[in-house]
């Protein structure tokens, strides 16, 4: 390491300061960016040297909202809580769609039968912007207590409340003595950060500050698992199945969790990841404040990563013998199936050339899926990643040492840039994210990179052993069935003009530096 390179302690703002109203932005805490294109090795070197910085575009199509991309989806499902949107009424509109989305999970698979979302909005208008709306928020808190008698009331801030400088903490201090519910303010103004991942940290900061209690006892068989919306209900069932086989219980958060589950996060034996970038802030806070150990890598995607994930949990729970027996049992069932999928991929082109896949991944999936693609015998010479920060730098360096270099486009919700690199690379399988643009006009395989939590079908799984086989078959299906892509190619107009695809770089609109 040269004298200019950052040490591990300098890469991330390690200490979580719960005396603050909220977390620092992900840009501040871990040098997060959402614009970059080049070799992954160069990205790692720039991050390690401290030279990596956020760049601006002259034009962008859309962006993620720190409030609506994350918090509308997750908080509303907490069973004995209510969310207050301190915002114009439109900021709560996404919750309507997600209410119906979650109802697709059958009660028979574990979705609470009495599930319903409860949220209200302060419906901020012009007068509120001029004179403030602290009293209006207070009245809403009293009304929520009266209507629903919840155990927690989450206050979600917005661009409007942030711009006018609403004193949220002052309102909480004034009205907390008047209600039984714990009031939990979350500073998730959509304008505060270019990285939607800041919303993850803001939520966990509030949970750690206001809800998590000192442990009455340590539960040696309890595992905290916090996961992204983009891991499906089948992933949840698979994790419960695997850990249940060795006598462990899962504290799944936040979907359909109770306030008590959040309060007792401090009693778990370990916090285990599905997505490291999502779990990080919570995991560090629980260790710092309550001594709950954690790990961030690997995620349980693919056979090898699932093995290591289980073994790491076993080290913290004393279940080493049971886990080794479980791995042996699962390998007998699933390895032949993985071998058959790999054989199909290896022989698909008939000339010994590997099938190439291009994924539109979050940075947590980047670490998990690229080794999994290698496990399937696929080639992944390029990848698209929503964001990048120092939280995954060490693991990216390990990944490069494991499988070699690849190109990477760091890109949040910029569909034009994604179609550009897809057109330029022309992979055998192009993977799309539901939040990052739709299907591409092409005559090769197209499939999704993930589903959403509400997808309860067995073929939607990606985690654990069943997920390794289900997702492998899903990728095979995208190679074999092209009717949808061909119809689009023949019947629809191109979204972008030809000149766009002739540009040499996907970041054509990157703003020039002085």
Image (cartoon, rainbow, N blue to C red):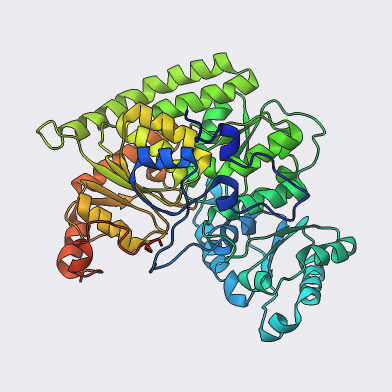
Rendered location of residue 505, percent (x, y): 26, 56
Q: For residue 134, what is the image quadrant?
A: bottom right
Answer whether residue 15 is visible to the viewer in this image.
yes
Q: On the rendered structure, is 304 left or right of 161?
A: left
Rendered location of residue 136, percent (x, y): 77, 76
Rendered location of residue 80, percent (x, y): 72, 55
Task: Determine whether 502 is above or below 19 in the image.
Answer: below
Count of numbered marks: 0
Q: For residue 379, what is the image quadrant?
A: top left
Task: Determine whether 508 is above or below 211 in the image.
Answer: below
Residue positioned most to the left: 351
Could you tell me which residue is drawn at 19 percent across and 67 percent down? 499
Answer whether residue 300 is visible to the viewer in this image.
no
Q: On the rendered structure, is 157 left or right of 351?
A: right
Q: For residue 122, what is the image quadrant?
A: bottom right
Q: Between 434 and 1, which is closer to the camera in this rendering?
A: 1
Rendered location of residue 280, percent (x, y): 59, 41
Could you tell me which residue is drawn at 44 percent across and 29 percent down? 305
Could you tell me which residue is drawn at 25 percent across and 45 percent down? 477
Residue positioned most to the bottom: 127
């Amino acid at each position: 390491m040269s004298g200019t390179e950052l040490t591990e302690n300098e890469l991330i703002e390690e200490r979580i300061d719960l005396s603050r109203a909220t977390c620092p932005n992900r840009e501040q805490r871990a040098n997060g960016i959402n614009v970059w294109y080049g070799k992954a090795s160069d990205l790692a070197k720039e991050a390690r040297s401290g030279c990596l910085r956020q760049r601006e575009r002259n034009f962008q199509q859309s962006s993620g909202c720190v409030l609506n991309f994350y918090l509308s989806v997750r908080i509303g499902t907490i069973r004995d809580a209510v969310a207050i949107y301190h915002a114009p009424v439109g900021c709560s509109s996404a919750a309507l769609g997600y209410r119906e989305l979650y109802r697709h999970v059958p009660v028979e698979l574990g979705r609470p039968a009495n599930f319903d979302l409860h949220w209200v909005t302060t419906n901020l208008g012009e007068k509120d912007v001029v004179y403030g709306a602290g009293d209006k928020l207070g009245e809403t808190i009293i009304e929520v207590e009266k209507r629903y008698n919840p155990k927690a009331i989450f206050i979600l801030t917005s661009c409007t409340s942030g711009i006018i400088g609403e004193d949220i903490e002052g309102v909480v201090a004034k009205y907390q003595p008047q209600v039984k519910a714990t009031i939990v303010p979350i500073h998730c103004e959509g304008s505060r950060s270019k990285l939607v991942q800041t919303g993850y940290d803001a939520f966990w900061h509030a949970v750690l500050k206001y809800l998590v209690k000192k442990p009455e006892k340590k539960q040696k068989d309890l595992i905290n698992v916090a996961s992204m919306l983009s891991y499906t209900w089948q992933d949840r069932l698979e994790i419960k199945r695997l850990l249940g086989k060795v006598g462990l219980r899962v504290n799944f958060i936040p979907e359909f969790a109770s306030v008590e589950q959040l309060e007792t996060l401090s009693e778990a034996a370990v916090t285990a990841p599905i997505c490291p970038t999502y779990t990080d802030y919570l995991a560090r806070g629980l260790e710092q404040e309550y001594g709950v150990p954690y790990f961030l890598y690997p995620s349980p995607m693919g056979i090898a990563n699932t093995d290591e994930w289980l073994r790491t949990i076993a080290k913290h729970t004393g279940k080493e013998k049971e886990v080794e027996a479980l791995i042996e049992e699962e390998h007998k069932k699933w390895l032949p199936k993985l071998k058959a999928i790999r054989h199909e991929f290896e022989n698909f082109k008939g000339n010994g050339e590997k099938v190439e896949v291009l994924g539109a991944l979050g940075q947590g999936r980047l670490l998990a899926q690229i080794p999994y693609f290698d496990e399937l015998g696929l080639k992944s010479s390029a990848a698209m990643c929503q964001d990048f920060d120092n939280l995954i730098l060490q693991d990216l360096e390990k990944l490069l040492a494991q499988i070699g270099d690849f190109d990477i486009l760091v890109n949040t919700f910029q569909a034009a840039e994604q179609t550009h690199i897809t057109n330029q690379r022309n992979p055998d399988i192009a993977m799309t994210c539901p939040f990052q643009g739709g299907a591409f006009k092409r005559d090769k395989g197209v499939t999704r990179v993930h589903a959403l939590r509400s997808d309860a079908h067995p073929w939607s799984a990606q985690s654990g052993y069943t997920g390794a086989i289900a997702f492998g078959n899903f990728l095979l299906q995208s190679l074999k069935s092209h009717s949808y892509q061909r119809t689009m190619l023949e019947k629809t107009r191109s979204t972008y003009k030809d000149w766009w695809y002739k540009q040499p770089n996907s970041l054509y609109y990157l703003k020039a530096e002085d």
